[in-house]
Image (cartoon, rainbow, N blue to C red):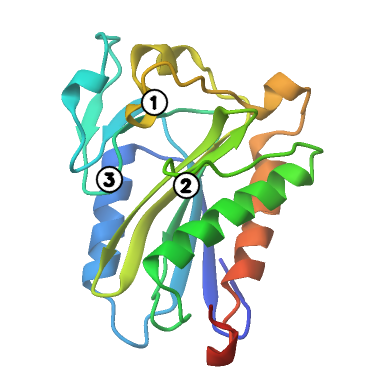
């Protein structure tokens, strides 16, 4: 654990952890928050699992694979998590950091874009489709839940994850959307290295801004 920044931010590196207990821990953390609770970032990987957002359509799971499907309370449709994919959960008091939900989403996308740029990859947003893309193919997904002004869930970046399970779904609800990973572009750095770079960009962008700096 470390505490960084002018407004404290706890970073937890959890390793490979099961999805459902981690989801329960995020909800419990958020339910127990007070004005004095320090924000946290959780860096981790999950064993293979599909997650379906609260308004998600089950038909976006195209076939059975033996991989468990968990219906959860974030926004968005269906996605896949597995080893080789970085997941960061952002347990953030948005009011404290003067962030609106849309600004938070933009911040997460920017951290991913900046991280990928460190490896020579030019990534971009796509209008109406949250996440980060390279040449129209999706390399990172994100989804949040905000309760009482505090966020949980977060983002997932494909480093060297097995892409085969993505063929069993319409990723994020988009038929025919191609999912890619950093390894496809010759990046040999592992999840530990990429994860630290991504954390650094998130910490930088989450630094509190004066009210006059708000859009």
Splitting the image into 4 quarters, where does residue 160 fall? top right
- Work out whether mark 1 precedes mark 3 in sequence or the reverse, and give the earlier one: 3
The residue that appears at 51% across and 28% down in the rendered structure is 83
The residue that appears at 47% across and 12% down in the rendered structure is 164
The residue that appears at 77% across and 28% down in the rendered structure is 187
Separation of disc 1 and disc 3 at Cα?
24 Å
Mark 3, secondary structure of its residue: helix
Q: Residues within 10 Å of mark 3 (few under 14, many from 20)?
A: few
Splitting the image into 4 quarters, where does residue 190 fall? top right
Mark 2, secondary structure of its residue: strand
Where 169 sits versus 147, above or below? above
Q: Position of residue 79 (x, y in %)?
A: 36, 30
Q: Position of residue 71 (x, y in %)?
A: 19, 36
**Of discs 1 and 3, which sits in the foreground?**
1
Q: Left or right: 94 with respect to 195?
A: left
Task: Give the residue at mark 3.
Answer: 21
Q: Which mark is residue 116?
A: none
Q: Position of residue 129 (x, y in %)?
A: 43, 40
- Work out whether mark 1 precedes mark 2 in sequence or the reverse, and give the earlier one: 2
Q: Is residue 201 visible?
A: yes
- Work out whether mark 2 precedes mark 3 in sequence or the reverse, and give the earlier one: 3
Q: Left or right: 77 with respect to 5?
A: left
Q: Is residue 84 visible?
A: no
Task: Give the residue at mark 1.
Answer: 171
Residue closest to the far front: 127
The residue lying toward the viewer, choosing from 199 and 56, is 56
Separation of disc 2 and disc 3 at Cα?
18 Å
**Of discs 2 and 3, which sits in the foreground?**
2
Mark 1, secondary structure of its residue: helix
Task: Give the residue at mark 2.
Answer: 155
Q: Residues within 10 Å of mark 1 (few under 14, many from 20)?
A: many
């Amino acid at each position: 654990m470390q505490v960084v920044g002018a407004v404290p931010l706890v970073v937890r590196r959890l390793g490979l952890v099961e999805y459902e207990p981690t989801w329960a821990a995020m909800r419990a953390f958020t339910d127990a928050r007070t004005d004095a609770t320090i924000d946290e970032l959780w860096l981790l990987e999950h064993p293979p699992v599909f997650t379906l957002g609260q308004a998600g359509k089950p038909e976006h799971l195209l076939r059975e694979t033996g991989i468990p499907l968990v219906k959860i309370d974030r926004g968005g449709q269906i996605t896949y998590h597995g080893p080789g994919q970085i997941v960061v959960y952002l347990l953030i008091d948005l009011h404290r950091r003067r962030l609106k939900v849309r600004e938070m989403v933009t911040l997460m996308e920017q951290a991913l874009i900046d991280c990928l740029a460190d490896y020579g990859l030019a990534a971009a947003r796509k209008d109406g489709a949250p996440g980060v893309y390279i040449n129209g193919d999706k390399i990172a997904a994100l989804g949040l839940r905000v309760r009482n002004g505090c966020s949980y869930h977060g983002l997932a970046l494909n480093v060297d994850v097995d892409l085969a399970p993505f063929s069993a779904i319409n990723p994020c609800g988009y038929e025919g959307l191609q999912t890619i990973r950093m390894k496809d572009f010759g990046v040999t750095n592992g999840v530990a290295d990429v994860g630290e770079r991504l954390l650094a960009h998130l910490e930088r962008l989450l630094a509190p801004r004066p009210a006059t700096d708000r859009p």
